[in-house]
Image (spheres, rainbow, N blue to C red):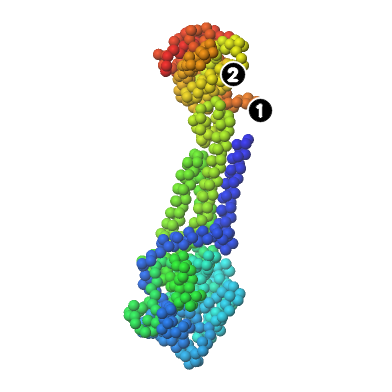
Amino acid sequence: MDERLQVVKRFAFVALILGAVVVYLFIPPAQRPAFLERLEYVAYDQRMQLSVSSTTVDSEIVVIDIDQSSQDQKGQWPWPRHLTAEMLTLLLTHYQVAGVGLDVYFPDETGCSSDLDSELSEVLQEYADNIVMALKLTDKPQAIRKKRGDVTGEGVSLVGIDGLPPAAQYLGHGVDFSGNLARFVTPQSAIGHIIPVIDTDAKVRQLLPVYQFAGQYFDALSLSMWRQILGADSLQLDTSLDHWWDSPKLRLMLGGQPVGQLHIPVNEFGEVLIPFHSRVESVSAADVLDKTIDAESLKGKFVLMGSSAKAQGDDLVATPLKPELPGVEIHAVMLGAMLAQMDDGAAPRFKTQPLYEKYFQVALMCVVLLVLLVAHQFGVRAMLVTGPLLLGAWIVSNYWLWAVQNIALELLPLMALILLLLMYLVISDLLDINARHRHIRRMFGYYLPEPVVQRLAIERQGSDWLKPERREMTILFADIQGFTAMAEMLPPEVVANITKQLFTNLTGVIHEHQGTVDKYMGDAVMAFWGAPLLDDQHALHAAKAALAMQAVVSQLNTAVFSQQNINIHLGIGINTGVVVVGNLGSEQRHAYTVMGGAVNAASAIQQLTRHYPYDILAGEETASQLPASIQVDLGSAETRKLPHKLRVFAITDAC
């Protein structure tokens, strides 16, 4: 019953571990324990760093950087509006870029004359089809306290696949904004929000492609540029799935129809993982204004204008790749991934976060649990091999899905399950082994040699040795003949000393020959072979032990007992047969012993040694398993203990 209760408790704890990991998996990331989420971020960043090329340059995207060098030459940002107008004009005419995305906005007057403002306004209106302006949104009240601007501009039309507005979970919800002065924005102006998602460790890994604010939808700067490039007039949130590892998709629409298969995969919260893929080329804004770069190097490319200057601190963000990255490069890599979809030969860059990832992970957890429980049946070593193999297989598979299949799965939950189960099962097994070791020591320490006790302690099914079972074994009885009369004439301490020395040496011999001491009975000892550990040569080992016991008695007579005028004569009886062996006795007292007819026969054979000139006698079954050269057939003999005759054999020589 105790063993069953232990098994139930163990399975209950395993179920508790599995349940805790599953609950963690279904908790939204923002509500998870911070230190665990940080570990997931670390794993994510490592995968990103391993898969991104630092030498490959995106050939279609260029960042115009209002860097510190440009500000040293042209003045602190924000620049006079005519300078910005001049740069935009140069980019679109002299350099003939395909489009411009502004990761800067114009929310205040800056002290410039209205004529200079009108110059920028005219440029923005003239090239409205090639320029996307910026809008800064926030979901935190009063987070924007300066540079508010007048207007947001016009948003984009967004519908679900059923023609209805998409579910709120897929949208960012802005409560405040910082935009541009009204004079710079027209109904034709393309607007894109520039706010990434900042994780709890202050790094940027994902982006909300669409924000909702003041009853309008605003797509991200990069997405707005992509729509402008393709002429798409709206967006559609497609929540249908093509396969189990698919996710909802944000599709480009033109006239109510999808623009090919072009889309952005989003997760269950409407976020897209920023596809850091390659390095983005950067050009100093001052060099653009001074025309010191080759016009052909920018021709036909898409440029995004922003700042890497530390003075514009809020324009720098931490990412998995760099502790400080100009925010404009976030939109550059997003646009690069979108443009790559238009190239049939280019590999996809966006990572898909399957909508049903959680259920897939739960299924994997059940498989892992089953494998670990099977390994657990084979012991601690099997667990210590299987656990790390499962862990390594999951890490490699997870990275392969990431790098080759562009499927992003959380790494930590399954890792945590493997580690927790491995630690629990191994530690509980070690504690069980230790408890079993102590238990076996208590039960067998006096009766078995230390190596045998150690073997019993580490066996997976060690407790089964205590259960009664039928087994063929060899039993030995050794009696000090005439010792009862001798003991009556000797002082008690001498009797105790003689038996102690004798039985200590005899026990050592039994242990050396793989035997188990059953009990001491006054001036006799009982032992058996074949349990608790199996022994295919139990009869031979018992015979060898009997011969060695006689040799030890002879040595003791010569070296010790002769000084006290004592001569010990040992009569040994051996018999082999099927007996019941196990933990036998009452509730108050029990012992690991043997019981059966073969035991009684062994005792009866031992008593026959008084009637034969041989010190070691064995039964017929024992003799049949011994070499013929060491035995003498004495024929059948009657005994007091048994109603039938026994055929006995004398053991006469070393085996």
State whether residue 385 is above or below residue 161: above
Quarter containing the N terminus: top right
Q: Which of marks 2 and 1 is in front?
A: 2
Q: How far apart are marks 2 and 1 (CA)?
A: 31 Å
Disc 2 element: helix
Residue 366 on image: x %, y %: 53, 49
Residue contact at pointers 2 and 1, CB within 8 angstroms: no
Q: Where is residue 239 in the image (x, y as percent from the top left)?
A: 52, 65
Q: Is any atom of residue 171 visible in this view?
A: yes
Q: Position of residue 12 (x, y in %)?
A: 60, 45
How many neighbours does mark 2 have within 10 angstroms: few (below 14), some (14-19), or many (20 or more)?
few
Q: Earlier in the sequence, mark 2 or mark 1?
A: 2
Q: Name the residue under label 2.
A: 496
Residue closer to the observer: 442 or 412: 442
Q: Which amino acid does label 1 sit on?
A: Glu
Disc 1 element: loop
- Does residue 543 lie above or below 147 as drawn? above
